[in-house]
Amino acid sequence: MPDLKLTGITKRFDKSVAVDDLSLSIEHGEFVCLLGPSGCGKTTTLRMIAGFETADTGTIELDGMDITRLPPQKRDIGLVFQSYALFPHKTAAENVGFGLKMRKLPRADIDSQVKKALDLVRLGQVAERYPRQMSGGQQQRVALARALAIRPRLLLMDEPLSNLDAKLRDDMREEIRRIQKEVGITAIFVTHDQAEALALADRIAVMSEGRLMQIADPTSIYEAPANATVDQFIGQVNALQGSIAKVDGPIAHVAITGGRYIWGLDRQIPVGTPVLAMVKHERVFLSRQRPAAGENIFPCQVVSRTYLGAWIVYHCNLGDQAMTAAVPNHPAFEQFQPGEAAFLHWASADCRIFRQ
Amino acid sequence: MKGMRITLSWIYLALIYLFILGPMFFVLAASFNTETSFPAAFEGVTLRWYARIWDHKEFLSSAWTSTLVALVSSALAVLAAFLAAYAISRGNKRENAWLSATLAAPLLVPQVVMSLGMLQLASVAGMGTGFWWLVAVHAVHNIPFALRLTMTGFARFDFALEDAATSLGAGRLTAWREVTIPVLQSSIVAGFTFCFIMSFVNLPVSLFLADTATTTLPVVMYSYIESRIDPMLAAVSAILFVLACAITLILDKIFRIRLVD
C-alpha cells in the first residue's frame, strides 16, 4: 500500500491554476524529488501535503487515512524550510524539542529524544547554542533534527539546500540521504536543481505549469523522458523542428530545414506530423574525419567554443540550424577552434521524437 | 578633506543635540532656581518647587489618570496594530494598501478636529465622555504609530517560523504565544512605549474629552499656566523628562529596542 497518495489534486489562486489534476503515489521509505522551474506548482503541492493550503478538489491520503482537510498541526508531518525557520529565541535543543513539548511529553523523554535527534545529525555539541551562533549548514541540520524529532509519518523538504554554498550543498545532500535511509522515513524533496534531484531521488516527479509531466527513476527521466518538456528541462538538449517523412521499422525519419533528414526512435507518430527531434548535448559527437559508418552524420561549422573545465561546449552551424555538442575535456577527444569545419554525428537511439 | 568632513558631521550632530536637548537644559535649571518667576536669571539652588508639587494634589491625581489612560489605550492600540500588521504582512497586496491607508488616516486629521468630532459623536450617541471614551480616542489616535513600529518588526519576520511551529503540532494561538510574539517582542514593546509616551503627553484630545473625573496631567499643566507661570511647572517637566529617559534606557537594556529605528 502506498504511504502517500494524491488523487486528482487541483488548486487555484484567483484565476490561475497552481496545481492541475495531480495524482501521485509514494511508497513507504521512498525518497521522491518534486522537480520543476519556479511557478510549476511544486511548492504549492508540498504546502497542500503539509496542510498549509487546502486542495480545491481531490484527496490526499497518508497511511490510508484521508488527511485532505486535516489541520497541519494534526498531520505529524516533518518540514524543513529553505530559510531553515529555526526559532531565533530558542537554543538548538529547544528548537528540536519544540514538537515534543507540543505533544506534552515528560521533560526527561524530551531531553533524551532531543539528544538522539541531534546525534543523528552529528550536532550534539551545539545543543545550547542559539541559531545566530551557528553556521548555515549547522542550522539546516538542526532544522532537520527538529523535523525528525517528532517521528513524523512523512518528511517534507522545501529547497532546503538552496541557501548553502556549493561545497556545503554537496555534503548536506549526502547527509540528508544518509539520514533518510537510517531513519527509513518516506521523504519528499522540492527542488528546481536537476543535479540535486538526480543525485538524491529514488524517483523524480517532474512538474510543469501545475501538471505532473513524468514520475520515474533518475535514469529513466534523463534517458527516456516521456515528453519534450521533461527532455528540455533535464540536462542540455538540442531540439530540431521538423516533420515525420517516413517510418522504417523502429526508426523514424524526420525532415528538417535544408532538405536534411535525421533519424530517431519511432513513437508511432503518423507521417506528416510536425515534431521535435531531441538529442542531448553530450550525445552529439564532433570529429574532423567523416565517420566511416553510422546515422545522422552532417558536415558543420564550429561557431564558438566555451571552456567549462570538465567539458568543452561547441556551438555549431548545420546549414541554418544551430546545434550544440558537449565534448569531454580528455586527450581521447579532438578539440576545435571557432571557424573550423567538422562533422556532427549522433546515434538514432539517442534521438527522441516528440509531437510539437 | 576627510578630516574636515568628519569635523563637519560632528558639528552637525552637536547642533541636533543642542536643539533637541537645549530647551530641556533651561527647564531643568529653572526647576532648581530660587527665583520665583520663570523664565529668569539663575539665582541659587532650591528644591522648593519640587516640594510644592505635593501641595497641588490635582497634579498627582491627574498624573495617575494619565498613567491609567496611557496604559490602557496603548495596550488597545498595540493589540489592534499587531492584528492589523499581521493581516497586512501575511495578506495579499490589495488588502495591504487599503488597510494601511485606513489605519494611517488618524495621522492626517488634526487632533483638534478629531477631538471635536469625537465630542460630537459622544453627544449624538448620548454617551458621556468619561474614562473609556478618552481611552478609546487615545487608542485610535495612537494606532498609526503602533502600526508603523509593529510593521517594522513584521517586515523582518519570516512567516515560515509559524508554519514550522504549526507543523510541529502547535495550534495558531500556541504558535503566536511560543514563536510570533516572542520573536516580535522588541517591536511590540517599542510600539507600546511609543504609544504610552504619545498618550501621556497628549493635550488636544484630552483637553476636549476629559471630564472632571478624568483630567490628565497635560490638561492640568495647561490650565495651571493659564493663570501663572512659575518654576513648579519646570519641576513637573523635569520629573517627566527624567522618567522618560529612565524608561527608554531600561527598555533599551532589557529588550534592546530602539524607539527610533
Image (cartoon, coloured by chain):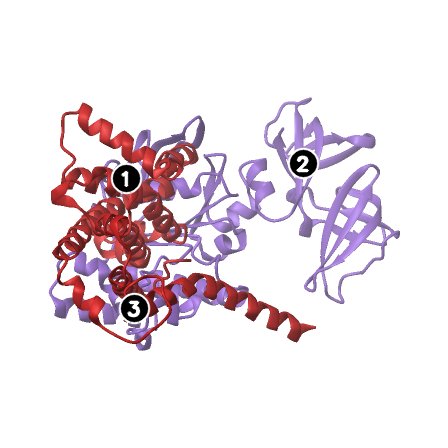
Q: Spatial distance from mark 3 to mark 2, Cα to Cα?
A: 100 Å
The quarter of the image holding the C terminus of chain A is top right
Instruction: Answer few, some or many: residues within 10 Å of disc 1's Cα (few below 14, many 20 plus, some between 14 and 19).
Output: some
Q: Secondary structure at mark 2?
A: strand
Image quadrant where one finds the N terminus of chain A: top left
Which of the 4 image quadrants contains residue A225? top right
The type of residue carrying mark 2 is Ala
Give the residue at x 44% y 65%.
A172
Which residue is located at x 23 percent, y 60 percent? A98
Badge 3 amino acid: Glu
- The residue at which mark 2 appears reads as A277
Q: Colour of chain A?
A: purple
- The chain letter for the residue carrying disc 2 is A
Q: Secondary structure at mark 3?
A: loop
Task: Give residue A141's position: percent from left, percent from top.
Answer: 37, 65
* Residue A302, above or below B207: below
Which labelled disc corresponds to residue B140? 1
| Colour of chain B in the image | red
Frontmost of labels 2 and 1 is 1
